[in-house]
Amino acid sequence: MRIMLKSKIHRARITSTNLFYEGSISIDEELMRQADILEGEKVEILNLNNGLRTETYAIKGKKGEISLNGPAARTGVVGDEIIILSYAVIREEKLHLLKPKIVYVDEQNRIKT
């Protein structure tokens, strides 16, 4: 078994932070769907502005929203560019079937086509 990249939302921008929330990252629901990220799924956040890597779980957000909540709110500020990653545990014999979903977004977190 290997842990492999399943999907990525590339260069999203943080739109808000909420330190006193229970925790997680709120992600635009359509971005979650396109990246095959489920609500409650573990994700890793890579902050391109400060180099921090954070693990948390995803929750559905409003259109264009990328909000760091709870302790994750300390790892970035509004406007920071981030990469959101999700992973899957795959059996060796199934590795050839995995094709990660990559979702590219613009400055307003809209999907680039």
Image: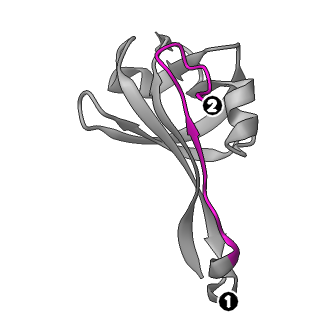
Q: Does the magenta-highlighted stretch encompass residue 46?
A: no
Q: Front-most of 65 and 70?
A: 65
Q: Residue at x 67, y 30 (%)?
A: 31
The answer to whether one can see residue 39 in this image is no
Return the mark for residue 113. Answer: 2
Residue name at image x 26 percent, y 27 percent:
49
Q: Quadrant of the N terminus?
A: bottom right
Whether residue 98 appears in magenta in the rendering, the answer is yes
Q: Nearer the viewer, mark 2 or mark 1?
A: 2
Q: Which residue sits furthest left?
A: 50
* Amino acid beneath label 2: Thr
What's the residue at 55%, 77% (across, down)? 2
Name the colouring of the figure. one colour
- Residue located at (75% from left, 42% from top): 38
Q: Residue 69, position in %: x, y?
A: 52, 21
Secondary element under disc 2, as helix, strand or loop, is loop
Q: Is residue 52 toward the left or the right of residue 95 in the image?
A: left
Dot 1 falls on a residue whose secondary structure is helix
Percent from the top left, x then y, of residue 51?
25, 37
32 above or below 80?
below
In the rendered view of the protein, which quadrant contains the C terminus? top right
Check the image and name the residue furthest to the bottom: 93
Among numbered discs 2 and 1, the one appearing first in the sequence: 1
Whole-percent x, y for residue 77 in the image:
35, 15
User: Which stretch did the figure color magenta?
Assistant: 97-113
| Residue position for label 1 | 93
**Residue 56 locus on image (x, y percent):** 53, 39
Examine the image and state in which quarter residue 91 appears.
bottom right
Q: Main secondary structure of the magenta part?
A: loop
Amino acid on which disc 1 is placed: Glu
Query: In the figure, 111 relative to 104: above or below?
Result: above
